[in-house]
Image (spheres, rainbow, N blue to C red):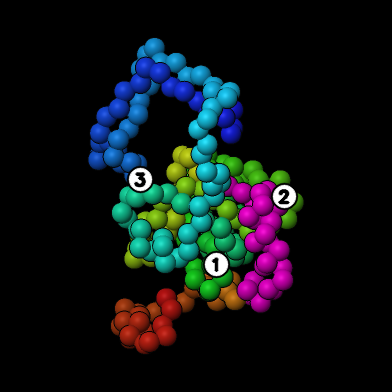
Amino acid sequence: MIPGSTYKLNNFFGSKTKNVYRVADPDVTIAFSWNFVLSVLKDSSIRFPEDRFRFHGYEQFEAACDLRGDLYDYIGHIRLVNEQTLNESLVLDEVEIAYMRRILVHLYIWDKAATDFCEKFKSLGKPPSVILVTTVNPKRFGGALSLSSLSSSRVFFDMDVQPTREYLAWLESNSEVANRVNAEIVTKAETATIGELLSYMKQEEANV
């Protein structure tokens, strides 16, 4: 299929989406039959609005968490990978990005999206500052909001697309944002008893 083209599909059937397989699908699934025909419409009068990325902020993802609704794209500033500062020896399967208002969001990247992330990360020669991941599914793991990639997810870095370039330019002109999360503090391991943890968590400004 050619990106940006409009296609006509003949000989297909529709059915209700099975809940057992549902992640964030619509109610109806369109499936190809054995004799389907897919053809390009060269002079189509149909015009679809150009909406390449649909970004949502923390509040919108929080509200949509675990509802299996629409999938959106997320752009953010990379601070940690696998709870470590950025370097070339990391196992690249989890990224933690900080939203501009000091809110940390865990981003889990799986399968092909994880492979693409690793390849792009290594090809840059230096750790990127900005990441954009498409069609992420908001879930809650261990009580924390997390964004999980799907098979349709794509990964972009600093200069890949216009939104990442704009975010990078904004980040460079607001350098204080890059220093809001102290990686050493976030990843510092400390031993404590259950009683000490409960006592600490009762404090208003506690961060665990």
Q: Which residue occupies 31% across, 82% down?
A: 198
Read off the residue under disc 1. 98
Comes first in the chain, label 3 or label 2: 3
Does residue 142 appear to the left or right of 170 in the view shown? left
Give the image quarter of residue 126.
bottom right
The type of residue carrying mark 1 is Ala
**Position of residue 38 measured from the top left corner of the image (x, y, whole percent):** 47, 19
Instruction: Decide: few, some or many residues near mark 2? Use Cα within 10 Å; few <14, some 14-19, many ≥20.
Output: few
Q: Quadrant of the C terminus?
A: bottom left
Q: Tell me, yes or no, whether the highlighted magenta stretch contains residue 149.
A: no
Cβ–Cβ below 8 Å for labels 3 and 2? no
Quick check: 72 left or right of 16?
right
Q: Position of residue 194 (x, y in %)?
A: 31, 78
Front position among marks 3 and 2: 3
Q: Residue at x 68, y 48 (%)?
A: 160
Q: Position of residue 96 (x, y in %)?
A: 53, 61
Instruction: Look at 54% across and 67% down and name the residue there.
Output: 99
Q: Which residue is farthest front?
A: 45
What residue does disc 2 label?
A: 124
Q: Which residue is mark 3?
A: 24
Q: Which sits earlier in the primary sequence, circle 1 or circle 3? A: 3
Disc 1/disc 2 C-alpha distance (Å)? 21 Å
Q: Looking at the picture, does residue 37 appear above or below residue 18?
A: above
Magenta region, residue range:
154-179
Instruction: Find residue 136 and report its horizontal and vertical position in percent.
Output: 45, 50
Q: Quadrant of residue 138?
A: bottom left
First in sequence: mark 1 vs mark 2 = 1
Is residue 206 visible in the rendered image? The answer is yes
Q: What's the amino acid at mark 3? A: Ala
